[in-house]
Amino acid sequence: MENIIPSLIVFEGLDGSGKSTQAGLLAKDLSASGRRTVLTAEPTDRPIGRLVRQVLRGEVRTSPRALALLYAADRSDHLMSVRSWCESGNTVIADRYFYSSLAYQGVSEDMDFLRLINAYPHAEKVIFVDTPAEECMRRIDARGGEKELFDRIEYLEKVRNNFKLVFSGLPDYVSFLEVDGLLPVEEQRRIISAFISR
């Protein structure tokens, strides 16, 4: 399996970090510039991804290890589409990838096991919107609605630390950007645009 997927841009961050907003803005900007662009997300809206979302909402109960395996299976299914889109000349922007599994499931599961089941190629570019857990929880609360499985400040702080650890070990061939999630949305957008156009 190759080590990188060309034309794949991944956004990562805690729930409430603002990564989904920035992923959407980048997709809009690239499309406006004439680039064929696909915006996608994990978990997906395919059958396995829908099951993952049911677990996150507390509608289905399973073990942490089974959830990690479900994420990996959904990702394997998703990658068939991602590769096809990229090979057809699209820039694919993904809201989450296997880095999220290492960060989130890594709080309770063995990291070697998680790396084994997520031995997928890296994205060409990775953008980490780094927002403190306290601010993420404030935004999640402001959205209203039911909280998901991982929406607890103590958990999110551990996830943030895991993200930092994962990204400190990225190979040199992956272009990486860390953006301060406390900056105004348009300032983040400008920084990300400059990074993508390099």
Image: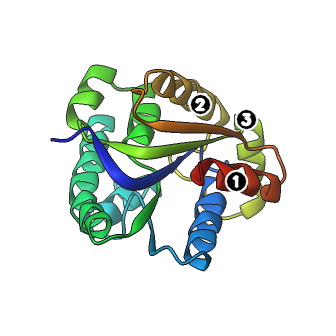
Q: Within the image, what quadrant is residue 26 found in?
A: bottom right
Q: Nearer the viewer, residue 43 or 188?
A: 188
Q: Secondary structure at mark 3?
A: loop
Query: Mark on residue 41?
Result: none
Query: Badge 3 is on which residue?
Result: 132
> Residue 164: where, in percent of width, then height?
56, 25
Of mark 3 and mark 2, the one earlier in the sequence is 3
Q: Residue at x 34, y 70 (%)?
A: 89
Q: Residue at x 49, y 38 (%)?
A: 175
Query: Badge 1 is on which residue?
Result: 140
Q: Within the image, what quadrant is residue 1 found in?
A: top left
> Residue 35: where, in percent of width, then height?
50, 73
Q: Nearer the viewer, residue 132 or 140?
A: 132
Q: Nearer the viewer, mark 1 or mark 3?
A: 3
> Residue 62: where, in percent of width, then height?
30, 45
User: Is residue 178 shown above or below 11?
Assistant: above
What's the amino acid at mark 1?
Ile
Q: Are marks 3 and 2 in contact (CB under 8 Å)?
A: yes
Q: Secondary structure at mark 1?
A: helix
Q: Residue at x 39, y 61 (%)?
A: 54
Query: Badge 2 is on which residue?
Result: 160
> Residue 14: where, in percent of width, then height?
60, 43
Q: Is residue 154 left or right of residue 80?
A: right
- Rounded to the nearest angstrom, the CA distance separating label 3 from label 2 is 8 Å
What's the amino acid at mark 2?
Arg
| One can see residue 18 in this view | no
Q: Residue at x 34, y 52 (%)?
A: 6
Of mark 1 and mark 2, the one earlier in the sequence is 1
- Rounded to the nearest angstrom, the CA distance separating label 1 from label 2 is 16 Å
Circle 2 residues within 10 Å: few <14, some 14–19, many ≥20? some
